[in-house]
Image: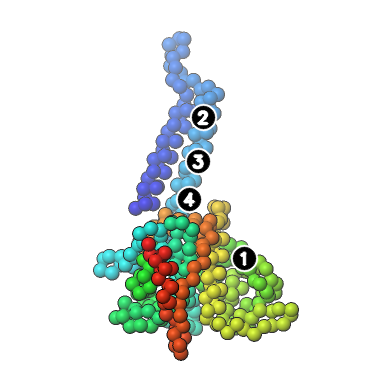
Amino acid sequence: MTILVILFVLGLLTGVAAAVTLSLFAGKRVVRADGRPTRKRGPLRILMGLVGIGITLMLVAVEGGWVYANAQFDKIERVDVDVSGDSVLAGSKGGTNYLLVGTDNREEVEGNRSDTILVLRTGDGPARLLSIPRDLRVPLPSQGGNETRINAAYNDGPVALIRAVQESVGIPIDRYIEINFVSFADLVDALGGVTINFPNPAIDTHSGLNVEQSGDVELQGDQALAYVRSRFYQEVIDGEVQPADGLADLSRIQHQQTFLRAVLSEAGSSRNPLHLARIGNALVGGLRVDNHMELADALAFAWNMGRLDPVQTELPVSFIQGSGEVALAPEAQAVIQDFAS
């Protein structure tokens, strides 16, 4: 509905601008000394007419841009977040909470994998980005309250994951955005690469990562994908390959978070129309969004990612001995309240 209103207003303004411009070029109707009517076009009217042409063309371009953007946005797959006709998105009272889910679905891996679960908070002060460990043990509403890793909720569908974050963690969600890392490699190429900071050169013989220098390094699509898939990350210091950090999945999740922040910030900061068109084409295949999201919401999200530097927020957890899982620590409630208010 929002896009229709915007297009209607733009169309109305374009029509008015065109009519005024034609009137200016037609000239002011006057009667000559011999009694015959004529049109008078002075320099000021011609100048104003030229300005009118410029405004009309600008409005036509803006309207065309909205039409194109909406057409591209309509190609993005929608996730049905309705249950019995009502949305499960609770919505926060203050700012806006975006649930960002990063997946790495590959042909050789069965089932759905939610590798990264983030909540981006905007609209009520500094933007905050909260990481929810996929090994967080919580009761899953979709499984009758059975306590297991929150990552398992994604296998029951996005609605189940949203409910787990809202009901078991306690953070209301406004918007759902799912990002496929495999498809996002195409987005990296459309951006011309994405910059990641490496304290030291690094390799991962399993994922194919091979970074030969330290500092800010521009990764292209294939190396960016190798980076987000890296589970056996090894730094090279003074020419010597260091042992892997042993964190495996945790390291990969950290890499994916770094990658997401970098690529979304890069995409959101672009203002070149041709560049944005390439980005839009690349985004179509790598995103899924909730079925209540409109183009204006998506543009607001992209704008925020381009100009904000979210504060990294850690969710306090404690390890559950012998399980490989974690539980919410008592200190977590203050962080959760910050995102829930």
Q: Residues within 10 Å of mark 2 (few under 14, many from 20)?
A: some
Q: Quadrant where the C terminus lies?
A: bottom left
Dot 2 and dot 4 residues touching (CB under 8 Å): no
**Residues at marks 4 and 1, CA–CA distance in whole angstroms:** 28 Å
User: Residue type at mark 4?
Assistant: Gly
User: Residue type at mark 3?
Assistant: Leu
Q: Which mark is residue 65?
A: 4
Q: Answer with mark 3 or mark 2, whichever residue precedes in sequence.
A: 2
Q: Nearer the viewer, mark 1 or mark 2?
A: 1
- 29 sits to left or right of 243: left
Q: Determine whether 108 is above or below 34 in the image.
A: below
Image x and y of residue 136, in percent: 43, 79
Q: Which mark is residue 195?
A: 1
Dot 4 and dot 1 residues touching (CB under 8 Å): no
Dot 3 and dot 1 residues touching (CB under 8 Å): no
- Which quadrant of the view contains residue 80? bottom left
To which residue does mark 2 refer?
Answer: 48
**Residues at marks 3 and 2, CA–CA distance in whole angstroms:** 14 Å
